[in-house]
Amino acid sequence: MRDPEKLEAETWLVSAGRPEAAGEPLNTPLVVASTFRYGADRGYSRNEGSPTWESLETIVGGLEGGEALSFSSGMAAIAAALDLVPVGGEIVYPDDCYQGVATHLAKGASQGRWTVRQLPAEDTEGWLAAVDSAAMLWLESPSNPLLAIGDIAGICAVARDSTTLVAVDNTFATPLNQRPLERGADVVVHSATKYIGGHSDLLCGIAVARSPEHAEQIRLSRVIQGATPGAMEVFLATRGIRTLAVRLRTAEAHALELAKRLQAHPSVIVTRYPGLADHPGHALAAQQLDGFGSMISFDLVDAGAADLACERMQLVEHATSLGSVESTIERRATTPGQEHLPPGLLRMSVGIEAVEDLWADIEQAIAP
Ligand SMILES: *Cc1c(COP(=O)(O)O)cnc(C)c1O
């Protein structure tokens, strides 16, 4: 067995989770089976999983440093992680975070499943003070779409001595740029739909737990709620993650260049990218992340200017979602539940196209 401790992450991504016996295929086959012959430890795939899922789980679990479980979507993985919260427990979550999480938390609160409270990601003192009362701290850093940076290690250092669980949505950072379990978090979730899949052609989620007990509870949620991934989706996500390092390094180099040019452009009011020296979370991001990622948000003067820019884009796709080889852009305040965002805020996921082609497209689109 290959050992994640002895290999660089880039090597692990390529070499882990493959069949190893002589005569076997190099790639884990797409196993399309709901049931397996009795006599070994795998019976029904909703319960015991499938070899196809296990490849992806080995790769991501090895990188994150925990036990990974694949799900039908990021939201399914998130719902399973939230099942760890005891009935009536308090969940503290960031005031800027993935809208699906905010909606799920509000729904659960209205049904009496848990109570909720929001804090700004950067308010480390507030998060530390919440450790005493909270059952779970839900962190997302960098956050969606304001790219705020929370102090994951600082918060985990305090939460670790309590019964409070720390869960981190690591979708924007990817397991290549940030490994919260190493910093003391209990659970990490990913929308593998995004950077892990990397091609906008699948829905998949992953939850990773540091302790075998939490992993077992998350597995049980998957078994009883049935939020299992499709074999084809996991096969594609595994194929996608093999190239995560080259995709991400290229996209984030382009993102830094574009962020600098946006910042200097007269049509742009503010540019948010953690790799910019004047981003409020830059120093913390530099410590906590192995790369600044490929998400940028920037504001044009108003909704009209932002809508016009989206319409004018020729190369950058006007579409939601992120983390793919192609660049996408959207005006985020059009997302239900995100009407509070600056009306001219554009969220861009930078892809791997040539950076000068991207800039030429953006420049013509945002011209006054
Ligand atoms: C997309 C996304 C999710 C939800 O994932 P799905 O695969 O769409 O269910 C959760 N968190 C973040 C940060 C995301 O970007």
Image (tube, rainbow, N blue to C red):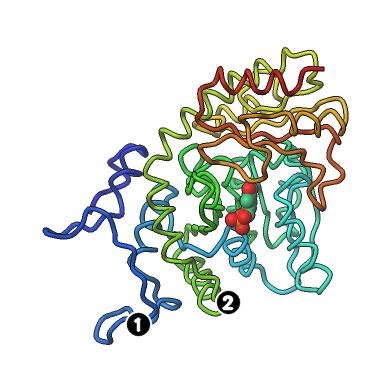
Residue 288 in the image: x percent, y percent?
55, 34
**Disc 2 from disc 1: Cα separation:** 18 Å
| Outermost residue toward the bottom in this view | 38
- Disc 2 residue type? Gln
Give the percent coordinates (x, y) of residue 180. 53, 46
Tell how many labels.
2
**Left or right of residue 336, residue 20 in this image:** left
Q: Amino acid at mark 1?
A: Gly
Residue 255 locus on image (x, y percent): 58, 25
The N terminus, quarter of image: bottom left
Q: Position of residue 86 (x, y in %)?
A: 67, 72
Question: Disc 1 on helix, strand or loop?
Answer: loop
Q: Are marks 2 and 1 in contact (CB under 8 Å)?
A: no
Image point 50% across, 70% down: which residue?
228
Q: Quadrant of residue 13?
A: top left
Precedes in sequence: disc 2 or disc 1? 1
**Is residue 186 shown above or below 315?**
below
How many residues crowd mark 2 within 10 Å: few (<14), some (14–19), many (20+)?
few
Give whichever of 179, 128 is nearer the camera: 179
Q: Residue at x 55, y 51 (%)?
A: 185
Q: Quadrant of residue 46?
A: bottom left
Asked whether, in this view, residue 234 is left or right of residue 23, the answer is right
Q: Residue under circle 2?
A: 225
